[in-house]
Image (tube, rainbow, N blue to C red):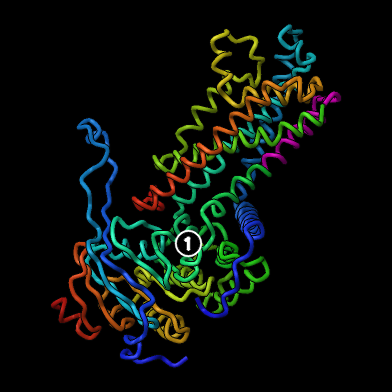
Amino acid sequence: MTPSTPPLPGTVTWFGRTLAAFIRRELVAMSGYRAAFATRLAGFAFTVIGMVFFARFVGAAANPHMAPYGGNYLGFVAIGFLATELQQVGVQGLARRVRTSQIMGTLEAELATPAPAWMVLGAAPVYEFGTAALRSAAYLWGATVLVGLELPRTNVLTVLVAVPLVLAAFIGLGLFTAGSTMLVRRSNPVSAMLGSLSFFVSGVVYPVSVLPSWLRAVGHFLPLTHVLVVLRAAFLIGSSPKAVGDSLAALAIFAAILIPAGAATFAYALRRARVDGSLTHY
Amino acid sequence: MPAASPASRAAAPAIVSVEKLGKVFLPPGGSRELLRGRLFREPVRALADVTFDVAHGEIVCMMGPNGAGKSTLARILGGLLLPSSGRATIAGHDAAASPPALRRSVSFIVGDERSFHYGVSGRENLRYFAALHGLDARAGARRADELLDRVGLAAAAERRYREYSRGMRQRLAIARGLLGSPSVLLLDEPTLGLDPVGARDLRAFLRDEMIRAAGRTAIVCSNDPTEARALADRVLFLERGRLVKEVAPTAIEAELGL
């Protein structure tokens, strides 16, 4: 190095700078693609409209299955969409970043910089979780304004306990799917299957009590099922952390298994890419 | 800084050391291989027993036909690819371990056009890469502007990358390679696809300003004799992954029978 080379910053500072630069670049790029911006806006509008229709037409009739949720079908489905959104971001965020960088060809150039791989690739999921949180807040606001969603019994403590566990479980899944994307060099092979299965058996738009028992058993093996139980209990009926202890424990187990397993899969995939030279393959 | 003579450069201590380097690729098999009970296709030997040193301040050109192993060698030295055997060190850092210190010492400059974000400007691209080099927003912006000016892209700094010509893209890649103030440049086909005048100007700029004046060392991978003659102190020939000979830049054409 030349003598004027400044020392590298601390890890947190460095990641903060990388994240800020990534967000800046994404916003600048997004502002240049009007059609993509309009499409995202339309996607948001369709989701809110979808929630309204679900609430009006499906939830209009009194349904005994909704009793455990205080009969609040609009809140039920709003939280279903919100949790699905978080799962999609968690599962697809890192994988999409890896895939996009491979296709664009930027991955190799980024990994040739002094920044560690986790820092290079980690900014995108953090950014996407941030935008997902904003979208979720917008969904809730839209549902409140358009169809009078009310969540007066929210137990904030349960939400605060649940959020880190929810994020940890989804990030673990995300690491795993990103690793598999890198290994097979195809668009996320796991997330599509996981998304469909979760939507079907986790109870995104209907309570799992309408499912046969064997399908409910399958749902217990999916993080989204427990995420929905915890968030609905916290937002709709004000349950304490103790009341949803089983689902919180399940999420903690998912996180404890998925994060190390996902990190190991991803590290292995990165090493394989350095062995077989596939950092720029697509 | 005045340019050192080839003799004094050769006497300088080695900054790049490559010892018995080998690389074998195992291409993943398709359905035919799977039906035969194999996960991989036949191994491809890209490098075998490659050994050489590069002295501080030297410019060494790696020549050879397509598929000779030049880019594989550059990627190993840049810490992007793991060797199957042997060892390579740059400024004392093991390339296989690829620590941040290695990636600060060496800059891998590839003529691949697909390595920038197409939707943002040259300046914005550089600012993002500056952050990956640890620079804060202000320092990154300053460094990006300084480098854009040095590579002659100041006037086009705000144009989107997709609007850049091939030559401009090559210059932007060079600017990116200098963000971290490296001591060794690895240049893979730096003037690939440029018109003769553009290529000549870029070579002169690289040699005089980016390498000699800055006291850097460079390894240039190319199969263009003109490029090798214009840039190199020494030329090493790779053939089917093996280092087969070393010649003076003035003897390349004779060696190739041109």
Q: Nearer the viewer, residue A85 or B136?
A: B136
Is the residue A256 above or below the residue A147 in the image?
below
Query: Residue drawn 15% across and 81% down?
Result: B254
Query: Residue drawn 76% across and 8% down?
Result: A62
In the rendered structure, which amino acid carries the disc numbered 1?
Answer: Pro
Kindly identify which residue carries mark 1: B99
Question: Badge 1 local density, few (<14 within 10 Å), some, or many (20+)?
Answer: some
| Picture quadrant of residue B166 | bottom left
| Picture quadrant of residue B110 | bottom left
Q: Is residue B7 visible?
A: yes
Image x and y of residue A193, in percent: 49, 27
Q: Quadrant of the C terminus of chain B?
A: bottom left
Query: Residue drawn 18% across and 71% down?
Result: B244
Segment tinted magenta in the rendering = A131-154
**Which secondary structure is most common in the magenta stretch?**
helix
Does A132 appear in magenta? yes
Image x and y of residue A272, in percent: 38, 47
Q: Nearer the viewer, residue A138 or A119?
A: A119
Image x and y of residue B6, in percent: 32, 89
On the rendered structure, is A245 left or right of B45? right
Residue farthest to the right? Answer: A152
Q: Nearer the viewer, residue B98 or B39?
A: B98
Query: Residue drawn 76% across and 25% down?
Result: A241
Image x and y of residue A3, in percent: 54, 80
| Picture quadrant of residue A242 | top right
Does B31 appear in magenta? no
